Image: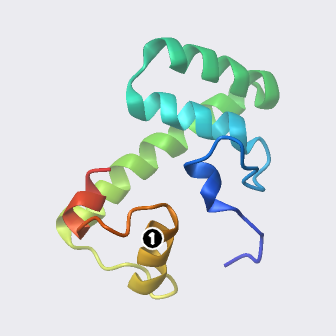
Amino acid sequence: MSGAQIDLSAVNDDSVDSGVAFGGELLAFTNAVMARDAAAIVKTRDAVEGRLGAEGVTDAAAVIAMFNVVDRIADATGIPIDEGFTRDMRYAIGDELGMGHLSPEERAIR
C-alpha cells in the first residue's frame, strides 16, 4: 500500500533480498522465535542487536509477538479485515507465500 517494492518470496527463501532494511536478520529472528529454538533466538537476537541496537531488538520482538497474537485473535473471533485490505489481498499474499493449498483454518495456525 505504501508503494515500497517488497519481495515476499524472501519469507521462504533465505537467498532472496526482501527489500526491507535488515530484512534477513529480522526474518531469521522471527523464524527462530516462531520455532521456539532458544539457541537460534540468542544468535539471531544478537545479530539484530548488532544492526539495530537494543531498542531495535525490543521493537522487533514486540512486533513478532503482536502480529502472532493479534492475527490469531482476529482470525478466531471473526473480526473483519480492514476495508483497505481486502480478503482477496490477504489470500493473494498467502498464495505468494505458498499457502494457497491450505484452508482458512490451516492458515490461521501457521
* Residue positioned 41% across, 76% down in the render: 91
Question: In the displayed structure, would residue 40 be above or below residue 31?
Answer: above
**19 or 75: which is nearer to us?**
19
Give residue 37's position: percent from left, percent from top.
42, 20
- Left or right position of 12 against 4: left
Residue 82 screen position, x and y as percent: 43, 81
User: Is 43 left or right of 2, judged from the image as shown?
Assistant: left
The three-letter code of the residue at mark 1 reads Asp
Local packing at callout 1 (Cα closer than 10 Å; few below 14, some 14-19, many 20+) is: few
- Which image quarter: residue 87? bottom left
The residue indicated by pointer 1 is: 95
Describe the element under mark 1 as helix, strand or loop: helix
Depth check: give the residue in front, 100 or 87: 100
In which quadrant of the rendered image does the N terminus lie? bottom right
Near-viewer residue (63 or 20): 20
Quarter of the image where one finds residue 54: top right
Number of disc labels: 1
Residue drawn at x 45%, y 88% as measured from the top left: 83
User: At 43% from the left edge and 85% from the top edge, which residue is drawn?
Assistant: 88
- Is 22 located above or below residue 45 in the figure? below
Say which of 18 and 26 sits in front.
Answer: 18
